[in-house]
Every structure is written in C-alpha cells, then in structure tokens.
C-alpha cells in the first residue's frame, strides 16, 4: 500500500515539475528584459524593415528567439551577433546566417553595434509577447440598441403628429363649410368675385402699370440669365470620386507630408504633375495598413486598408513576398482643376518665384478627406489676387531695378503684381 501511495506521489510530482518546466520554457525568453523599453527600441531601430506578425524587408519577429531555439538550436548569443553585425556572421560561414541572407535576396541587414546586451534583451522581450487579442467593441451593439429605441420613439412621435394633423384637417374642413354657408347666405362670395374682376380690368386698362410690370420682368429675367451664363465653365466645389481613395487629410494633415514631395514638378514646371505610383510606394512598401485611430465613422480601417491593396494591385506589388510581380495596371485619375486652353498659368512662377503657398489657390488641403476645387479659378478671381498680393522683392536681385523705378512711380514701398504688369492681357493670354 505504501509503495502505491509513493508511486502516485512521485508521478504527481514529476507531472507538476514537467508542467512547471514547460511554463518556464515558453516564457523564459521574455523574463530578462523590459517589453516597454523594447517596444521603443524596436520602433526606432527595427520597424523600418520588420513587423512582429508580417514578413516585410525582413522576416516577422514575434517569438523569433523561441523559434530559432526550437528549429535551429540557436541561442541568444547567436542572435546578438547577428543583430550587431550580420555581415561578419555571414562571412564567417555560419550556415543559417547565409541561408537567411540568400532567402531575402541578399538584402544586407543594418548593423547595430551600438545596442547593448540590455537593449537586445529588451527588444527580444518585446518580440516574445503574445499577440494582443482584438478588442471586441460593444459600441455597435449599444448603437444598435439606441437606434432601435430611437426608432420606436420616432414612430410614436410620428404617429402622434399624424393624428394631430388629421384632427386639424377635419377642423379646417368644418370651418370652411361653415364660412361657405355664411358667404352664400350674405352673397359675400359674389361680391368678392365682382371686385376681383373689376380690379383685373382696371390693371389691364392702366398702360403705365403694364409697362412697369413688363420692365420688371425683363430686368429680372436678364439678371437670372446673366447669373446662369456666368457660371458656365466654373467648377468650384467639383469633387469627383477617384479610382483609388486618397486622403489629403491623412497625408498632408495628420502626417504633415509636404505638398511638393508628391507634386514635385510644381517647383520647376508649368504644371504640378500627377505623382507616379512609385512615389506612393516609397512609403507604402512598409505601410500596408493604417492605424486604427485613423478610422472614422464614414471611413473604416478596413476601407483604408482595401485602398492600399488597390495601390499594390496597380503597381504589381506582392505584399506577401515583398517584391514586384511586373503585372501593373494603369490608374485613371480624374482631373479636378482645369483651366481653359487660352489661359496661361505657370506653377513654378507662383510657387518658387512668388513663394505662394499651395493653400492660397487650393484651399485647406490638409483638411480635405476628398480633394475638391476650392476656388472658382475665374479671371476675376485671378485679377483680384494680382491686385492684392505684394511681390516679394527682398534679397531678389532680379527685382531691384524695376522695384526702385516703380516704387517712385506709384509712391509706395510695396508693389503688387498688378503694378508690375500683372493685369496686362498678354501675361495670361497669348
């Protein structure tokens, strides 16, 4: 009996020890570092090429130390050597280092000799954290409940209003019948008809009133006709839907990207140009999804991520393999701003020479989710701008002589574009 009890106790002890060992072994890698500090180091040094759960320029790094230990028998010492100087490890003939180098098309990893053992421990502790479970939001349920309750309330209110209007209609009908009876009894209705006829007859016979009325209608018609024809070709507020949704609010506003990074030709050319999709891929090779905080009630995170996938399809980018396939599709962008062919406008003259901000003509672009034509772009609008805008002549040798002469002519210190010939027809029409 004692032997049986002893064997049972021994078995339980061994089982408990095994479970304890497995628990320790799965979390051992994350115990000797600070994940919070590791996250900051990871974002600073690693995030340009690595994600935790997705292959990018380099492999996904979640549980990387544990994977290497289980699959390759490599320890933290090997990882530290790789992080600090991967090229040296490759040249030493290390088999796995050369395999990784070849698997990623010979892309050399940046060396980080400045990272201390503590820094590497913190980074690895961050990579060994379990993936956070998606937060299940009860907001939709609450919203649905509130909507349902609001719907019931609205129905009750609408029903009550319907009954009230029906009662009012019945009351008005009854009042109308009563008044008609009184009118018929006293011949009021006949008298009103007689008065109306006599009044109309008097108006028709008065030629002066007829002439004034005719002139009034002619002037009113001319005013509305002029207003209508003056709007022909003016597309202020035009906001087309583009084949790939591009949020200026996110790019120019939230991320502070300079307009001229994408529209680089605006500084040196007549036109601002349509950015090549390769310009987009400078960032979106690594940015394959938007931050959850970017989503709004109108545009969800899934919507924005889907538009990035449209970009990948257009340029032929395989996100899984992190390489171009060569299969591209042209994107048919819809033009928003369009001047008549007889009007000359040079972006570089305004952007580089005059130093005018893009928002002067295009409005608060950094606030626009969908780009639209902010200004009317009419001749009067351009002329007013030339009349009101002072030319920047400071430290500009080109304007020194003409500024001196025109300042004396007009008796002013500052010259507007109009005073320097900005109203001459040939400046814009040629």
Image: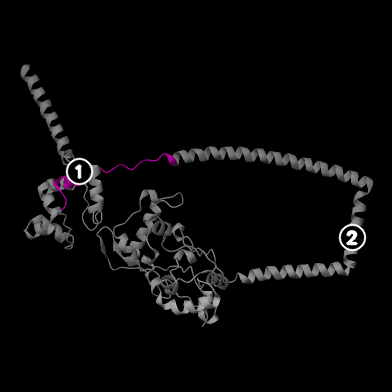
Which mark, by number, is residue 53? none
The vertical placement of 359 against 345, above or below, is: above
In the image, residue 126 sits, relative to residue 382, either above or below, namely above
Vertical comparison of 424 with 364: above or below: below
Mark 1 surroundings within 10 Å by alpha-carbon count, few (fewer than 14), some (14 through 19), many (20 or more): many
- In 3D space, how far apart are the residues under numbered discs 1 and 2 (Cα atoms)? 96 Å
Read off the magenta span: 114-139
Q: In the visual, does 130 lie left or right of 196? A: left
Element under disc 2: helix
Lateral position of residue 14 relative to residue 202, left or right: left
Residue at the location (7% across, 23% down)? 7
Q: Nearer the viewer, mark 1 or mark 2?
A: 1
- Percent across and percent down for residue 425 are 55, 80
x, y percentage for residue 306?
37, 56
Q: Residue drawn at (51%, 69%), measured in percent from left and top?
A: 389
- Spot the residue most to the top: 1
Q: Could you say whether the residue bearing mark 1 is in a helix, strand or loop?
A: helix
* Magenta span contains residue 327: no
Image quadrant where one finds the N terminus: top left
* Drawn side of residue 379 relative to residue 131, left or right: right
Residue 125, magenta (yes or no): yes
- The answer to whether residue 97 is visible is yes
Name the spot of residue 36 as percent of width and height, x first: 25, 43
Q: What numbered label is drawn on residue 199?
A: 2
User: Where is mark 1, residue-wise?
Assistant: 125
């Amino acid at each position: 009996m004692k032997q049986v009890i002893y064997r049972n106790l021994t078995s339980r002890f061994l089982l408990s020890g095994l479970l304890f060992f497995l628990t320790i072994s799965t979390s051992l890698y994350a115990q000797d570092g600070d994940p919070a500090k590791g996250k900051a180091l990871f974002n600073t040094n690693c995030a340009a090429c690595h994600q935790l759960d997705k292959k990018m320029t380099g492999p996904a790094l979640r549980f990387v130390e544990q994977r290497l230990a289980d699959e390759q028998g490599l320890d933290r010492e090997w990882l530290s050597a790789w992080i600090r100087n991967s090229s040296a490890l490759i040249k030493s003939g290390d088999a796995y280092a050369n395999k990784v180098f070849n698997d990623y098309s010979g892309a050399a990893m940046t060396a980080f000799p400045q990272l201390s053992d503590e820094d590497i421990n913190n980074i690895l502790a961050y990579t060994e954290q379990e993936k956070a479970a998606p937060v299940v939001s009860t907001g939709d349920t609450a919203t649905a409940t509130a909507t349902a309750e609001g719907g019931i309330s609205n129905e009750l209110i609408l029903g009550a209003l319907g009954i009230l209007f029906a009662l009012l209609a019945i009351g008005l009908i009854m009042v109308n019948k009563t008044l008609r009876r009184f009118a018929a009894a006293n011949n009021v209705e006949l008298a009103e008809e007689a008065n109306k006829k006599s009044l109309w007859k008097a108006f028709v016979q008065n030629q002066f009133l007829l002439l004034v009325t005719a002139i009034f209608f002619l002037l009113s018609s001319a005013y509305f006709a002029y207003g209508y024809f003056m709007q022909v070709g003016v597309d202020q507020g035009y906001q087309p839907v583009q084949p790939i949704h591009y949020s200026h609010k996110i790019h120019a506003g939230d991320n502070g990207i300079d307009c001229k990074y994408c529209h680089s030709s605006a500084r040196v050319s007549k036109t601002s140009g349509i950015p090549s999709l390769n310009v987009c891929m400078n960032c979106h090779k690594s940015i394959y999804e938007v931050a959850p905080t970017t989503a709004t009630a109108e545009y969800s995170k899934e919507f924005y991520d889907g538009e990035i996938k449209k970009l990948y399809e257009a340029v032929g980018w395989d996100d899984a393999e992190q390489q171009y396939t060569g299969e591209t599709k042209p994107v048919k962008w819809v033009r928003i701003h369009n001047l008549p062919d007889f009007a000359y406008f040079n972006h570089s003259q305004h952007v580089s020479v005059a130093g005018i901000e893009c928002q002067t003509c295009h409005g608060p672009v950094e606030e626009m989710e969908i780009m639209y034509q902010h200004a009317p772009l009419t001749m009067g609008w351009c002329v007013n701008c030339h009349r009101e805008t002072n030319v920047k002549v400071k430290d500009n040798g080109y304007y020194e002589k003409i500024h001196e002469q025109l300042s004396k002519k007009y008796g002013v210190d500052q010259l507007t574009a109009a005073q320097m010939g900005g109203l001459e027809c040939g400046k814009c029409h040629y």
